[in-house]
Amino acid sequence: MNTLVTGGSGLVGSAIESEFKPTKDELCMCSLSDICDYIEENKIDSIIHCAAKVGGIKANSEGLADFYTENIDINTNLLESAFLMGVDKVVSFMSTCVFPDDAEYPLTPSQIHLGEPHPSNYGYAYAKRMLEVQSRAYRDQYGRNFVTVIPCNIYGPNDNFNLDSGHVIPSLIHKCYIAKENNTDFEIWGTGKAYREFIYSKDVATITQWVLENYDSREPLIISPDEEINIAIIAQEIAWRIGFEGNIVYNQKRDGQLRKPSDNSELKTLLPDFKFTPIEEGLQKTIEWFIDNYKECRK
Ligand code: GFB
C-alpha cells in the first residue's frame, strides 16, 4: 500500500513505518490542492492521518479557538482531498479527551456526543469529535472506508518536551532533568491526584497499522491499555529513573479532568494477544531518548 502518514515527524507519525511521510514544509495540511497533488503524484491509496495541532492542558486551555479552528481546517482539507482523489481508506486520530466531562465510566464510543467536553480542552475536543462526524458522513454519502481511533494519552520518543505546551510525561521528564542539573525543586502542576491512561507511541503505531489493514467499521476504536496511573506516581517514577533526590512540589493548579478511564474491550477482542509496553519500560526508553537527543528535540 502507498500509505500517506500525515504528521509523519510527530510523536505517533514518527513511530509508523512508511515511505510517504512528508514534513510540514514538504506538505502543508492548510492547502487542499497541495494535498491532492501529493496524493496523485505518489499514487497514495490509503492515509494514516496523525497531523493535528496538539498540546498539553495549559496550551489547550489557553488556545481554545486556535485548537478548534486549526484542527477543523486540517481535517477538512485532508478528508476532502482523500475523497476527491479516490482514496478509499483513511485512519484518523481522536483522543479520549473527546468524551463528555460527566460521561459514565468506562468511556465508550456511544457516549462521544452526549455532552460538553471538559472546559480545559473543549476547542480541541469538539474539533476531534467532528472527525468522527466527517468520517461517518463520507462513509454514508460516498461509501468511503474512513475510520477513526480514540487513543488515550500517548507518550514516547519525538514528543514535544516543551515545559509550557507539552503533555505531562515529556514536560515532567524535561522539568526533572533541569531540577537535577540545577539542584532545584521538581514542580508538578495540580495536586497529583488526577489519573490518566498512558500508551507508548510504538504500541499506537503497531495497532494503527493493523487498523489500516483490518478495521473497516464505522464505530470509533478505543486504543488504551487496562490501567490508569496517578500523576504523583508518574512524577515519582520519572524522578527515580532520572536520579532526582530533591523536593517534589505540587502547585495545586490545573488538574484538568480527574480521570478518563476508557473501555478497551473491543480492542482486546480484536487483538487478544497484543502486549502493551509496560509504563516503566516506556518511560525508561523515553527518558534515554530525551537525554540522547537533548540538543535537537522539540522543547
Ligand atoms: O498531559 P496533560 O497536559 O493532558 O496533563 P490532559 C495530564 C495531567 O498531568 C493533568 C498534570 O492533571 C496535569 O495537571 N500535570 C502535572 C502536568 N504536571 C504537569 C506538567 O508539567 N505539564 C503537563 N502538561 N501536565 C490533554 C488534552 O489533557 O490530553 C489534549 O488537553 C489531549 O487535548 C491530551 O487530549 C491527550 O490529559 O489533562
Image (cartoon, rainbow, N blue to C red):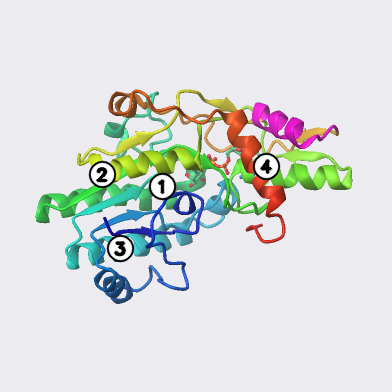
Find disc 4 in the rendering and name its residue. 287
Distance in Å between CA atoms under marks 3 and 2: 20 Å
| Image disc number at residue 78 | 3
Distance in Å between CA atoms under marks 4 and 3: 33 Å
The mark lying in front, picked from 3 and 2, is 2
Q: Earlier in the sequence, mark 4 or mark 2?
A: 2
**Which range of residues does the magenta coloring cover?**
232-245
- Label 4: how many Cα within 10 Å (few below 14, some 14–19, many 20+): many
Q: Earlier in the sequence, mark 1 or mark 2?
A: 1
Q: Earlier in the sequence, mark 4 or mark 3?
A: 3
Find disc 2 in the rendering and name its residue. 213
**In front here: 213 or 106?**
213
Q: Is residue 167 magenta?
A: no
Q: Amino acid at mark 1?
A: Ala
The mark lying in front, picked from 4 and 3, is 4
Q: Amino acid at mark 3?
A: Leu
Q: Earlier in the sequence, mark 3 or mark 2?
A: 3
